[in-house]
Amino acid sequence: MKKCILLFFIVILGLFTTSCGQSNALGTSENAPSENAISQATSEKDPLESLLTEDLSGELTVSCYDTMFYKDTMEKAAKAFEAKNPGTKIHVETFASMPVMKTLENGITVSTRDNEEQERADYIQKINTELMSGQGADLLAMDVLPYNKYTDANLLEDLQLYMDQDKDFDISNYRENIIHALKYNNGQYIMPLDYMFDYVAYDKSLFTEEEQEKLKSRGKYTYNQLFEDGLLPFNRAKANTNQPIKMFHTTAGPQTFNALFNMDYESYIDIENKKINLTDGRFAKLLESVKAYGDKAYLNPDSESGEFTLEDFEKIRSEQFFYKVKSSFSLLEDVTRKFELEPSRSANILVGDDTHDEVLGLLSNADGKVNFRYTQAFSINSNSKNKALAWAFLKFIISDANQSDQTMFLGGLPINNHARSERAKLETLDMIQKEDAESKEKSQKVYDYYVNTIEAFSNALNNAPVKDDHIDMIISNEIVDFFSGNKTSDEVANILQNKIELYLNE
Amino acid sequence: MPYLLMGFTGFTLFYIWPFILSAKYAFTDKPANGIFVGLKNFIELFHSKPYLLGLENTLYFICISVPLAMSISLLLAMLINRVEKYKAVFTLIFMIPLVMPSGSMVFFWKALFSKKGYINFILSSIGISSVNWLESTSSIYVIVLIFIWKNMGYNMILFMVGLHNIPKMYYEAASIDGAGAVQSFFKITLPELIPTTVLVTIMSIINSFKIFKEVYLLTGNYPNERIYMLQHFMNNMFYALNYPKLTTATCVLVLVITPLVYFLLWFERRQRE
């Protein structure tokens, strides 16, 4: 027994000595790369350079979650790539079941998917297990996967190295500010295929000319500014009508809270640096403000059941609102209407009567940060046996030829600059389907205005906060208690501070 | 021997071997393509606030719930032992919690202890302000109650078997010599129950870790700080893909539990001798 204990301690001493040696070699700071790490990265460049100049061959697996969004698009891209590069084979794997189309009582058709949350959790678990065991697909779609966690676990390739080393890659062909805004931990671990942003439109029939001029004088808008600027017309409308018109279409509850919270997300929760700040009073004040907006009737009250019912939907569709926050998807429709043309389709089913809507500008926070998001982005698995092919296929997906093809599904605006203007042309023609001379002339104006607006807005985009689904879930579960009156704002802030701090520091 | 071999093979295949295979992560810096870092993960683990919080809470919970559960179970076993009529019925009643699924019972506990639950209703009806049972430091007492409720039947059965094995002539001889009930308890019952007590202690400590199931179903991955247990830490490490930290925590747990169980069995053997 004594010999066993002695042997045990000798082993421990050996392991301890080894660990100290390793610590000294790699440096003590987690964030700043040590000299060894830098030289390691530098030496990695050389094999990477030779990788990128090799002839493309072999097989590649691309893993995506959403079958509806990805399957056809990726398979089509794969076939085109294989035709261009004989000797290569691309396998596309998707996971989610196809949604089922259902027609509601009011005639609107919606697509639904049963057990979507569970499917998503299962997919993330599957990918986690594969990556942890040193396997997994070569190219991973990052729309539902936590790329920041994979980056922290060194499971993704730093694409900056590829972009720098590949002579055939010119970043000026793409939206550089969007790509760079998605850097994490000083590296580029995801490549977005597209991007989207929110903009504010206002109902010009509810503002006087003078009020409109004052409104349009700002370039970017914070929610607070919009509430302030809308107060006078709101009070006027309140006095003149029995049906008070609301400031925004979102309800005075979690919906509006999330919108406001997301504008300043990183000031509350900095995932990259594992810092959380919910108890300095701002978070509690934010909760109270949203409640106050409901008390002052600026916003519709939250549904008692907490769910968005068919009745809520019907009500919102016909209501007027002072402001509407719309996604970039709706911009062409508003621009078309600006030139007194009737759009052939409408994406605005949830933002009320938009007959008098005029584009105002982008939403920002008080620090000037303008958020955007992506619907599709890809990363290269650091376990991949064919990184060169993965990079080549990724470049192909974001190439002009691929992204200009309107049959290739993209959830937002293409990251490729030329493809963006090409798609805008096709979308404008699709939106204005009239063939007469006047409409054709106007459609050119619509296109020019639309493209200029898109590019002006896109230039201002500078922030895509790193978010965590789990943290969002913790927050959404807790704030319900505040809005239902079960807890005070300070209680909620303290509970969230403790829970999220625990989560981030694990 | 052949029967033991089958069980041992299964135990090795499904418990020992996976543990050995996964233990390597405790000595690497990352799950995939990691490099050997010796004891660095262990050193970092003991600097990790969540781990230390989980460890403190788990030890606190074990120190309160295990002795309490054992005392209550022993008391119940002794009471039921004295009952002549309907002994089986009483035994069955206390065994029911053991067979009830945790998922179903969570609904009941939530109804009792949520902020607008029955307990707070009773408290407010008698003029006492309601308590946030599940989201305050009081949550530990709820968990202790759940643990006792769930495990007292099992411990009670073990104690009843132990009590049954104590020869009655010891008590008769003691009563002839003038020993009272208390003296008989401390001089005869407790010493004779040492083997059973050791077994119950080991099983209770093991079962104290299983309370995580109820805590998780009641309060999720990140409960109030007071009931954030070691298992929460390990479960969350699994989902966060932090296999090095997970396996390091597991290794520490094995290193602590193994000598503890060895000590208890040695103590029992010594007492028997």
Image (tube, rainbow, N blue to C red):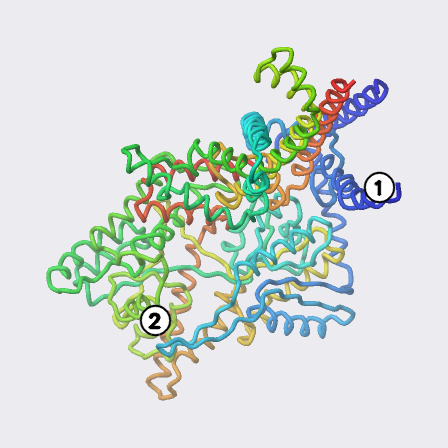
Q: Give percent across and percent down for residue A434.
A: 37, 86
Residue A353 lies in what quarter of the image? bottom left
Q: Chain of mark 1?
A: B
Q: Which one is in front, B59 or A271?
A: B59
Callout 2, which amino acid?
Answer: Val
Q: Most extreme residue toward the left, as rendered?
A: A239
Q: Which one is in front, A113 or A133?
A: A113
Q: Give percent across and percent down for residue A121.
A: 57, 56
Secondary structure under tag 2 reads: helix
Question: Crowdedness of circle 2 by 10 Å Cα count: few (<14), some, many (20+)?
Answer: many
Q: Most extreme residue toward the right, as rendered?
A: B2
Q: Nearer the viewer, mark 1 or mark 2?
A: 1
Q: Chain of mark 2?
A: A
Question: Crowdedness of circle 1 by 10 Å Cα count: few (<14), some, many (20+)?
Answer: few
Q: Give percent across and percent down for residue B94.
A: 55, 39
Q: Is residue A111 left or right of residue A240?
A: right
Residue B178 lies in what quarter of the image? top right
Mark 1–mark 2 contact, CB under 8 Å? no
Residue marked by disc 1? B4
Q: Residue at 48% x, 65% y: name it.
A: A412
Instruction: Say whether residue A294 is visible.
Output: yes
Report, in whole angstroms, how far the alpha carbon at label 1 lies from the one at label 2: 79 Å
Q: Residue A162 shows which numbered tag?
A: none
Q: Residue at 30% x, 61% y: name it.
A: A249
Q: Is the N terminus of chain B in the top left, top right, bottom left or bottom right quadrant? A: top right
Q: Which one is in front, A386 or B31?
A: B31
Residue marked by disc 2? A335
